[in-house]
Amino acid sequence: MSRALQIAKVADREKTAGRLLKSSAEKFYDPDIDIDWEAPVVDGLHYHPEHRISLYGTEMWDRMTPEQRIELGKHEIVSIASTGIFFEVLLMQMLLKQVYRNDPTTNHVHYLLTEIADECRHSTMFGKACKRLDAPAYGPRVWVKQLAKILPAIGRGPSTYAAILVAEEVLDRMQREATADETMQPLIRMVNRIHVLEEARHVTFARAEVANGMAEAGWFAKKYHRLLTALVSYFVALSLVNPKVYKAVGLDPRAARKAARNNPHFQATMAYWGERIMGFLREADLVGGPGMVLWRHSMLLPR
Ligand SMILES: [Fe+2]
Ligand SMILES: [Fe+2]
């Protein structure tokens, strides 16, 4: 890259970070103040839209009572929120490394610190929500957690941001829909509203980082980023619904997990959650090669 182009790119990056910093200062939430954690849950309202629950439409679903269905939705949303915490913590580690490496006088670094502060509040909010709903913070399976420890060490460049974008944009799709749904618990709607609003900035930032990173990457680096993005995204998708949620509502976890994986409604739900981010990743040339097997198993691609 020529020197002039490099200067223009840095200026551009600073401008984007400056704009996002301004928006962050104008609009942010404090879950300790902005959410009434003592408010009672409302009988009969849902925690997760019914048609997005993994067993919706299956024979198993037909045999479940209305209360059991609402309860399964609650455990699934707690599983998703606690998995959200796990990915936010990974992201924070990777962002802190960027702060460590870069000039602390730049807008870019100030924005990285602001995003870390956002994610600290989000993880607290999700943790409090799990506690309020009185369900275990399932998170991903133990072996996924162990494996993911290497991510902050090996993750750099566009695939770091792409993998995080998958988690952020899948959640965004899910939460936007639930925010607008009046059959949902008010607590869940407020948590979702806060997260959607603040994540919009993160998505803008990460998309710019992915686009710039891929534009600069060479042939081999592109292959590496495609594979790493597919691998992390597969684990994001796999981790959303921990099979322990089925046991919590009296179902056989193995049979229920199998029913969910083969459920065309849930396959369509996963593809719906993945639709927007997959479009972006394709444009950024991050979908293809050997990682396609993982993408197909993730269910984020339409069948
Ligand atoms: Fe977040
Ligand atoms: Fe985020």
Image (cartoon, helix red, strand yellow):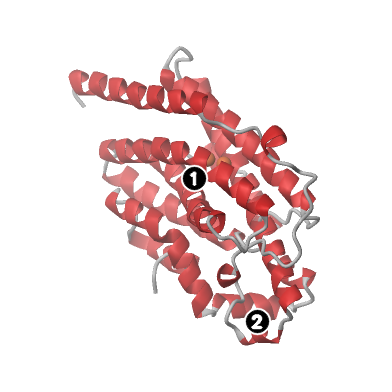
Identify the disc placed on residue 61.
2
Asked where in the image residue 274 lies, by quadrant, the reply is bottom left
Q: Viewer-proximal residue, 48 or 167?
A: 48
Residue depicted at x 30% and y 48%: 284
Q: Amino acid at mark 1?
A: Ile
Q: Is residue 193 left or right of residue 124?
A: left
Tell me whether circle 1 and circle 2 mark residues in contact (CB < 8 Å).
no
Q: Viewer-proximal residue, 241 or 143?
A: 241
Q: Which residue is mark 1?
A: 164
Q: Quadrant of the C terminus?
A: bottom left
Q: CA gap, disc 1 to disc 2? A: 32 Å
Q: Amino acid at mark 2?
A: Trp
Residue farthest to the top, as pictured:
105
Identify the disc placed on residue 87.
none
Query: Cβ(mark 2) to ligand 1 < 8 Å?
Result: no
Dot 1 or dot 2, earlier in sequence: 2
Q: Quadrant of the N terminus?
A: top left
Query: Cβ(mark 1) to ligand 2 < 8 Å?
Result: yes
Can residue 154 be seen at all in this image of the molecule?
A: no
Mark 1 crowd level (few <14, some 14–19, many ≥20, 10 Å Cα) = many
Residue depicted at x 78% and y 69%: 248
Residue depicted at x 69% and y 56%: 78
In the figure, 85 relative to 22: above or below?
below
Ligand 1 is located in which of the four quadrants?
top right
Asked where in the image residue 203 lies, by quadrant, the reply is top left
Residue depicted at x 53% and y 56%: 180
At numbered mark 2, what does the secondary structure look like: helix, strand or loop? Answer: helix
